[in-house]
Image (cartoon, rainbow, N blue to C red):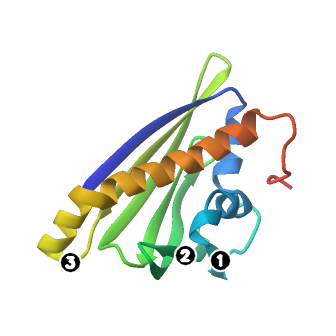
């Protein structure tokens, strides 16, 4: 099992950060380079507890699908999405939100296990872990930019 932990400081209210993190539309905008699209489940807006979404994207030159379900939610402090179908052996992404003075601390705890036993472990150590960290950091940068910006793209409507 691999765990990636990221903390992002955002100068915006906790509720806004929480909602932007649940925005299907913002996620699609942040993943344009992989051609990500929704093929089933919640297609736009803010994903809710118990809902699922199936993403399709090209990673490592391979078209892949990943279905996640929001399994836990305590608004505006915490939610979890877990893979119910996809290429990983397992995947659980915890999204934590707290306040520190006038800032929101958005913390990701991203746990996953690569498939294919020994080959998956080798691929993970050489490529996948770095790729996933960068993927999450790019998404978080977009959330931060949107939350702090005065020219919002209306992901919360």
Residue 97 as seen in the image, left or right of residue 23: left
Asked if residue 48 can be seen in this view, the reply is no
Question: In the rendered image, which residue does mark 1 sit on?
Answer: 38
Question: In the rendered image, which residue does mark 3 sit on?
Answer: 116
The picture places residue 136, in percent across and down from the top left corner, at 49, 51
Name, please, the residue furthest toward the left.
Answer: 118
Q: Nearer the viewer, residue 17 or 152?
A: 152
Circles 3, 2 touching at the beta carbon (< 8 Å): no
The picture places residue 152, in percent across and down from the top left corner, at 84, 44
* Total labels drawn: 3
**Pointer 3 or 1: first along the chain:** 1
At label 1, counting other C-alpha atoms closer than 10 Å, the crowd grade (few under 14, some 14-19, many 20 or more) is some
Mark 3–mark 1 Cα distance, whole angstroms, equals 26 Å
Mark 3–mark 2 Cα distance, whole angstroms, equals 20 Å
The C terminus: image quadrant: bottom right
Question: In the rendered image, which residue does mark 2 sit on?
Answer: 57
Residue 55 as seen in the image, left or right of residue 62: right
Q: Nearer the viewer, residue 117 or 47?
A: 117
Q: Specify the quadrant of the image occupied by residue 34.
A: bottom right
Q: Nearer the viewer, residue 43 or 114?
A: 114
Please report the residue visible at 69 percent of the width from the left and 74 percent of the height from the top.
42
Mark 2–mark 1 Cα distance, whole angstroms, equals 9 Å
Residue 94 as seen in the image, left or right of residue 147: left
Please report the residue visible at 23 percent of the width from the left and 66 percent of the height from the top.
123
Circles 2, 1 touching at the beta carbon (< 8 Å): no
Could you say whether the residue bearing mark 1 is in a helix, strand or loop?
strand
**Pointer 2 or 1: first along the chain:** 1
**Pointer 3 or 2: first along the chain:** 2
At label 3, counting other C-alpha atoms closer than 10 Å, the crowd grade (few under 14, some 14-19, many 20 or more) is few
Q: Nearer the viewer, residue 95 or 4?
A: 4
Please report the residue visible at 39 percent of the width from the left and 56 percent of the height from the top.
131
Decide: is 136 above or below 17: below
């Amino acid at each position: 099992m691999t765990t990636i932990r990221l903390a992002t400081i955002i100068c915006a209210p906790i509720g806004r950060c929480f909602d932007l993190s649940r925005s299907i539309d913002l996620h699609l905008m942040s993943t344009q380079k992989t051609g990500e699209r929704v093929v089933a489940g919640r297609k736009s807006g803010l994903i809710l507890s118990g809902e699922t979404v199936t993403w399709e994207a090209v990673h490592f030159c391979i078209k892949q699908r990943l279905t996640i379900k929001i399994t836990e939610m305590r608004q505006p402090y915490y939610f979890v999405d877990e893979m119910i179908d996809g290429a990983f052996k397992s995947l659980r992404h915890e999204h934590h939100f707290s306040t520190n003075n006038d800032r929101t601390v958005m913390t990701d705890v991203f746990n996953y296990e690569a498939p294919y036993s020994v080959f998956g472990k080798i691929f993970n150590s050489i490529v996948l872990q770095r790729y996933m960290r960068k993927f999450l950091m790019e998404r978080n940068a977009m959330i931060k930019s949107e939350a702090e910006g005065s020219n919002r793209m209306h992901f919360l409507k």
